[in-house]
Amino acid sequence: MEIKILELTENKAKFILSDVTPAFANALRRIAISEVPSMAIDDVFVYENTSVLTDEMIAHRLGLIPLKTDLDSYVLPEKCSCKSEMGCNRCRVIGSLNVEAEDGRKTVYSGDLKFEDPEVKPVTDKIPIVKLEAGQRLKLEVHAKLGTGKQHAKWQPVSTCAYKYMPTIEVNKRVCDGCGRCVEACPKKVLNVEKEKVVVVDLLSCTLCMECVKVCPKEPPAIKVKGDDKTFIFTVESTGCLPVKRILVEAAKILKDKGEELSRQIKELG
Amino acid sequence: MVEFIIPVRCFTCGAVIGDKWEEFSRRVKAGEDPGKVLDELGVKKYCCRRMLLSHVEVIDEILEFSKFKGEIKKEPW
Ligand SMILES: [Zn+2]
Ligand SMILES: [Zn+2]
């Protein structure tokens, strides 16, 4: 297995994963989406809501706000030793929001949420939650918990998490006369004509759409496009709750634990 | 899309777009090209772009009907 990083920032990663099976690449993708924990608001206690949105709608919007997650200091509620319905300091964070529009129209933002742990905060302060008219008020308490994308999409730490096969494009130099029809047909501008021959200029952008093969006037086509099912181009984008790097490391850890658990159970069978 | 208020996240991919609405609508109202504004805000995928591009902020109209005429009384509790 080999990983070659093409792009890596706090919230986005693009890399080539090679020498693995499609099953392995897919396991990594699915775990990153649905099993890496992140923090989101789960319980909302509404004390006063005179806004035009219903309590449920506001609770739903609050739940979707991604929160900066501290995976090392919190545990999943079902794994916490407290076993309490309301949770303890290790499995939930309490926050509050209290906004009143006094003299004019006012927007309530994610930044108005205040948590008792200063490490837990919305990834951005600018998400509108609701708009209030003069005299309206929103006062509530929230419990944020760790959870996984399997339970609810609000706990999914990634937005895009996808891979494609590494494209391989072969141009038969003896047959190709450089008519340029494939260059025009390609929606991703992967090809170009140089010295009356078609050459590949941007291989990684190829989406394996096969348009170039379809328009080639030669029979059989002078261009061959295939996907390599041992090499994968991954694109992962984080919602901001965790750095992408951490999400992928956690996903790999969970996959390893699953493998170890499987082999342990098989050994138990005898 | 006729939503009450700008959705927090993109319906398709789940990326946060709610925080970009105010700047987007302000700049588009001022006459800038929506496509250019989206590019500058870093909204790249077309699923997220349509969220902002097609949004109608209905809550602004609804709020007109919720204006309280008269004296604002505090709740008894
Ligand atoms: Zn607990
Ligand atoms: Zn999207």
Image: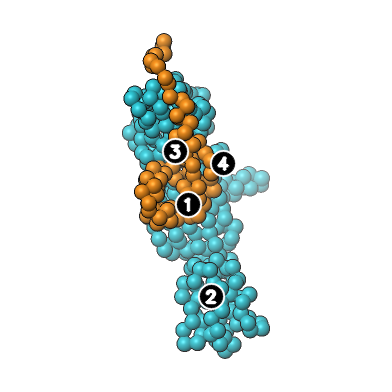
Chain colours: A cyan, B orange
Examine the rendering and report whether any part of residue B60 can be seen: yes
**Mark 4 residue type:** Lys
Q: CA distance from mark 2 to mark 1?
A: 26 Å
Check mark 1 vs ligand 2: CB closer than 8 Å? yes or no: yes
Both marks 1 and 3 on one chain: no
| Residue at (40% x, 49% y) in the render | B28
Q: CA distance from mark 1 to mark 3?
A: 19 Å
Label 4: few (<14), some (14–19) or many (≥20) C-alpha neighbours in 10 Å: some
Of callouts 3 and 2, the N-terminal one: 3
**Mark 2 residue type:** Glu
Check mark 3 vs ligand 2: CB closer than 8 Å? yes or no: no
According to the image, label 2 marks what residue? A184
User: As displayed, is residue A185 above or below residue B55?
Assistant: below
Q: Are marks 2 and 1 in contact (CB under 8 Å)?
A: no
Of callouts 3 and 4, the N-terminal one: 3
Both marks 4 and 1 on one chain: no
Q: Could you say whether the residue bearing mark 4 is in a helix, strand or loop?
A: loop
Can you give x and y, in whole percent of width and height, for residue A68 in the image? 39, 40
According to the image, label 1 marks what residue? B49
Can you give x and y, in whole percent of width and height, for residue A41 in the image? 46, 33
Of callouts 4 and 2, the N-terminal one: 4
| Residue at (38% x, 15% y) in the render | B71
Q: Are marks 3 and 2 in contact (CB under 8 Å)?
A: no
